[in-house]
Image: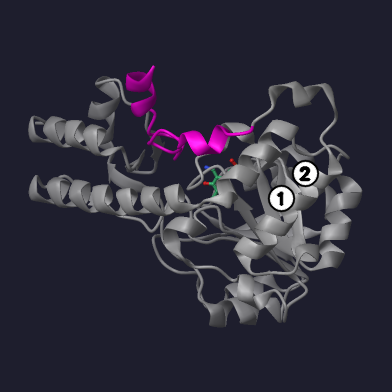
């Protein structure tokens, strides 16, 4: 089981076991009842505290994927703009719902300065840092330029805990900013499906109108609450990711296997090498000439480096 999971390097999931404290006080019998409002309210307060915003700016939902689906439902009659490549669900869901979506092509660069011109009159989405390229696309100056031009700017901060970059401090000044964050990455709760939006209460109200009443299961709310009660395991995991990423990148560079680090929890490696790892039982996501690989646990990093040494 553990062995198989450690080879799951394609979805940027947590690669370390979760601390037992996360499961403390989890009352399974509670599933007889619908999710209690007080539980969601308590989590909202904890998220507000964690993100440094007023609780009225917090909207809890079932994953960023759920938020994306909901966003297109709320703004079904608007034109959207995003960069390419970006997290694939933005395009996938727009196509599914028949939403008009234009794309601005990127390499591993930041957003071009004329992005704000193209964004005019559109709901604009920036994945920051970006997946799959792993880099920061936008600084505060460009964000404010966009905010003065667009009806709504959505910033996907799924990897915030790894990058340390957030636009949350701009929320007070800009009512047209919305930030998506998740418990799936650094908090290691991908299977629980909990995420949140930070946005002006007017936007929170709009999203609430279009969403289901019982958005997140009781057990998932409890897990997220426990996770925020003590985030030291998150800090430790982020540190492990940074150390193992550096170790892996250095080893691959010595072996002349091309790779790119990221400010997230994954790296990009040469496609042929990624295919070699797949032949050894690893799961890896591919894009263009790259394999995108979640930074493994220390022991699996060791294994990947040993395989790299015997590659070719
Ligand atoms: N946004 C980005 C940029 C992602 O990489 C991912 C997951 N790979 C998601 C959102 C999905 O998050 P969630 O699990 O909360 O749906």
Residue tagged 2: 39
69 or 8: which is nearer to us? 8
Look at the numbered discs 1 and 2 and tell me whether their residues touch, using CB distance below 8 Å: yes
Task: Tell me where residue 101 appears, x and y as whole percent.
Answer: 69, 54
Residue tagged 1: 43
Task: Tell me where residue 12 appears, x and y as whole percent.
Answer: 44, 40
How many other residues sit within 10 Å of disc 1, few (<14), some (14-19) or many (≥20)? many
Q: Quadrant of residue 154?
A: bottom right
Is disc 2 placed on a helix, strand or loop? Answer: helix
Task: Tell me where residue 223 appears, x and y as whole percent.
Answer: 62, 38
- The residue sitting at 91% across, 50% down in the picture is 209
Above or below: residue 238 compared with residue 95: below
158 or 150: which is nearer to us? 158
- Ligand 1 is located in which of the four quadrants? top right
Task: Tell me where residue 33 appears, x and y as whole percent.
Answer: 85, 26
Is disc 1 placed on a helix, strand or loop? Answer: helix
Residue range of the region highlighted in magenta in the rendering: 1-25
Above or below: residue 145 compared with residue 122: below
Quarter of the picture containing the C terminus is: top left
């Amino acid at each position: 089981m553990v062995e198989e999971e450690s080879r799951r390097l394609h979805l940027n999931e947590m690669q370390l076991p979760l601390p037992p404290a996360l499961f403390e006080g989890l009352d399974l019998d509670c599933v007889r009842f619908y999710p209690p409002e007080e539980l969601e309210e308590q989590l909202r307060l904890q998220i507000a505290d964690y993100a440094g915003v007023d609780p009225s700016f917090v909207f809890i939902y079932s994953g960023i994927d759920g938020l994306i689906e909901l966003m297109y439902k709320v703004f079904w009659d608007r034109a959207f703009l995003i960069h390419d490549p970006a997290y694939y669900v933005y395009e996938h869901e727009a196509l599914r719902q028949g939403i008009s979506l234009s794309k601005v092509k990127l390499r591993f660069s930041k957003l071009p300065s004329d992005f704000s011109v193209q964004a005019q009159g559109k709901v604009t989405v920036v994945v920051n840092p970006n997946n799959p390229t792993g880099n920061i696309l936008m600084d505060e100056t460009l964000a404010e330029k966009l905010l003065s031009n667009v009806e709504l700017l959505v910033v996907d901060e799924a990897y915030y805990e790894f990058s340390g970059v957030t636009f949350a401090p701009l929320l007070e000044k800009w009512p047209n900013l919305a930030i998506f964050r998740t418990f799936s990455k650094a908090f290691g709760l991908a299977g629980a499906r909990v995420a949140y939006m930070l946005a002006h209460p007017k936007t929170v109200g709009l999203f609430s109108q279009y969403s289901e009443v019982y958005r997140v299961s009781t057990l998932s709310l409890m897990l997220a609450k426990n996770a925020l009660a003590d985030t030291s395991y998150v800090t430790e995991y982020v540190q492990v990711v940074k150390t193992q990423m550096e170790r892996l990148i250095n080893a691959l560079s010595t072996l002349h296997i091309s790779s790119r680090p990221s400010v997230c929890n994954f790296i990009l490696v040469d496609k042929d090498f990624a295919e070699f790892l797949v032949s050894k039982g690893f799961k890896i996501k591919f894009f263009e000439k790259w394999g995108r690989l979640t930074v493994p646990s220390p022991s699996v990093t060791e294994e990947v480096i040993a395989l790299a040494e015997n590659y070719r």
